[in-house]
Image (cartoon, rainbow, N blue to C red):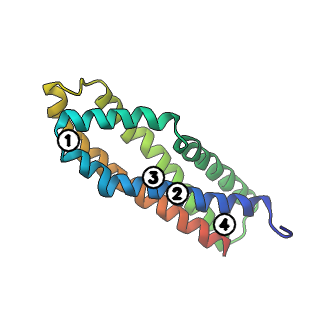
Amino acid sequence: MAGVSFIGILLGLAALGSALIAGVFFAFSTFVTVALSRIAPASGIAAMQSINVVILRSAFMPIFIGMALVSLVLAFATLRDWQGARSIYVLAGATFYLLAVFLETIVFNVPLNDKLAAFDANSADGAAFWPSYVREWTNWNHVRTAASLLAACAFVKAMI
């Protein structure tokens, strides 16, 4: 591994991690929420409530949060040691991930999940909320999908 720097390793991890996150979000945007919206609301709500609990203790969370930390480190290191176009790509990747993936999740998707968690899956109120939840949550998830993919592309571009 001669010639590979700590920042180079972080860039590789950032590219891989953000691509992995993009894949998870892509799956939700293209078929998971679509499938859940096609079944009875009580079943869809119960399934999504379960997903929202399970994900917090899954392998997804260390990668999701770790990517935010890696993005912060890369952004600060890049600002400290500016390297022209490479630095622009690093900052672009970090910005996409930190703002349009991580922060957007906290500001939009998590509050929607918290609202959904407050409903009894079998309640009429839950059934009434379900269609707007799926629509709004999925729309924000499309943003996260695109942003994490753009972050991965920017991190890869910074490496070449």
Q: Position of residue 24 (x, y in %)?
A: 44, 53
Distance between the Cα atoms at labels 1 and 2?
27 Å
Q: Position of residue 13 (x, y in %)?
A: 65, 58
Seen at 25% across and 52% down, the residue is 34
Q: Which is closer to the viewer, label 2 or label 4?
A: 2
Q: Position of residue 38 (x, y in %)?
A: 18, 47
Q: Which residue is mark 1?
A: 132
Distance between the Cα atoms at labels 2 and 4?
22 Å
Q: Secondary structure at mark 4?
A: helix
- Outermost residue, bottom direction? 160
Q: Dot 2, crowdedness within 10 Å: few (<14), some or many (≥20)? A: some
Tag shown at residue 20: 2
Q: Which is closer to the viewer, label 1 or label 2?
A: 2
Q: Which is closer to the viewer, label 3 or label 1?
A: 1
Q: Position of residue 105 (x, y in %)?
A: 43, 43
Distance between the Cα atoms at labels 1 and 4?
40 Å
Q: Is the residue 8 above or below the residue 31 in the image? A: below
Q: Which is closer to the viewer, label 3 or label 4?
A: 3
Q: Which residue is mark 3?
A: 100
Q: Evaluate whether residue 150 shows in this view.
A: yes
Q: Look at label 1 and name its amino acid.
A: Ser
Distance between the Cα atoms at labels 2 and 3?
16 Å
Q: Look at label 3 and name its amino acid.
A: Ala
Q: In the image, is 117 to the left or to the right of 37?
A: right
Tell me which numbered mark, 1 or 4, is placed earlier along the sequence.
4
Q: Look at label 4 and name its amino acid.
A: Ser
Residue 157 occupies which quadrant of the picture? bottom right
Tell me which numbered mark, 3 or 4, is placed earlier along the sequence.
4
Image quarter where the C terminus lies is bottom right
Q: Dot 3, crowdedness within 10 Å: few (<14), some or many (≥20)? A: many
